Amino acid sequence: MGNIKKVVALILISAMLMVGCSSAPANVSSNESPADTTASSEETFVIRAGIGLNDQHPQYKGLEVMKEYVERESNGRIEMQLFHSSQLGDDIQMMESLQLGSQEITAPSSAPVSSIDKRFMIFDLPFLFPTEEIASDLLDGELGQELLDGLAEHGLIGLAYWENGYRHLTNNVREVRTPADMEGLKIRTMENQVHLDFFRALGANPTPMPFGELFTAMQQGVVDGQENPVPTIYLQNYPEVQKYTSLTGHVYSPFVLLMSKIFWDGLPADLQEIVQEGAIVARDEERRINREYTAELVGGLREKGMTVSELTMDELKLFQDATKPTIEKFKDEIGAEYVEKVLEEIEKLTEASK
Ligand code: KDG
């Protein structure tokens, strides 16, 4: 390599390293060792949090609560920057950015997290959680924590479970009240084997795709429908491109609030504590807002011209029966022992709630 080329290469490498420094753990003013509680109080950190949903969604409101909490409690040593509507990429890309240390927080539904740890497929088993409260109790307990802890070996810190909620079907072709009505419908699903399997079992034609591509896919007729909780259907303006909602509630989706382990390891212990607390404070508020919106916005969908079908117990049972084989099919892949423990715990929580 000639001298001039060498100099240019060196300049480029230094520039890349400088960019890397300002984006990676955003540790701008010191080289102190990870989790060093004596780190200078001048040291500041930037957390970039990115999600797929828009800034009207309870998930974004949760991030605003967390931002307020961590910035206040850290006396400004942490700054949180929020990005919505897949501005930083889709769920799978953002999880990869966390693993590389080039983004600090994301919060996908649990479904795409199963591309990292298959055990996360458990939450996508159809008709698993009888109520939101039972889901929260299980997720916030030991069995939920076990999965969050397991993420560390994949470069991720699982901070908490927030709520996306019960997923319902929308489409633009016909009213769906039974699996027979789903025959041949092209339905966008999340990128997850369990979802693909049970939508096939229902007679639909499932098409996995990232969330950020969904609205345009519906608008252009690439898919006939999709499934998401009521706040998402309403707040992402799906009534503009979808005529029918069926309140199937086939899956309860948690969000998994994730942080980059590279970034976490570079945070002093006192700030780690503040981030963890902020995640929990915001979780409770996010769930509260989500439940409030869910109750209010069913009417909102009707006001926006959608036909919203509430299914009878008999109709719902047809969906449950058609999707039951999915549980057996994925039991071993998820881990039979873990599945059993979760099913037992849900039964216990259900009994206790009576
Ligand atoms: O911000 C979360 C979204 O990116 C996504 O996970 C929402 O449930 C979702 C979906 O249908 O992809």
Image (cartoon, grey):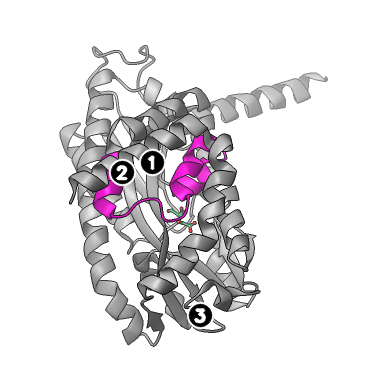
User: Mark 2 — residue?
Assistant: 347
In the rendered image, which quarter is residue 231 located in?
A: bottom left
Q: Are marks 3 and 2 in contact (CB under 8 Å)?
A: no
Residue identified by numbered label 1 = 343
Q: Distance between the residues labelled 1 and 3?
A: 37 Å
**Total tally of numbered discs in the picture:** 3
Q: Is mark 1 on a helix, strand or loop?
A: helix
Q: Does the magenta stretch include residue 133?
A: yes
| Rendered location of residue 188, percent (x, y) | 58, 64
Could you say which is closer to the camera, residue 29 or residue 332? 332
Residue position marked by numbered label 3 in the rendering: 241
Label 2 crowd (10 A; few <14 / some 14-19 / many >=20): some
State yes or no: discs 1 and 2 in contact (Cβ < 8 Å).
yes
Q: What residue type is labelled 3?
A: Val
Is residue 88 or residue 23 the one in the foreground?
A: 88
Instruction: Confirm whether residue 255 shows in the render.
Output: yes
Read off the magenta span: 109-138
In terms of secondary structure, what is the magenta stretch mainly? helix
Amino acid type at mark 2: Glu
Tell me what residue is drawn at x 49 percent, y 55 percent.
Answer: 86
Magenta includes 282?
no
Left or right: 275, with 322 as reference point? left
Which class describes the residues within 10 Å of circle 3: few (<14), some (14-19), or many (20+)?
A: many
Residue 57 screen position, x and y as percent: 33, 61
Q: Residue 294: which quarter of the image?
A: bottom left
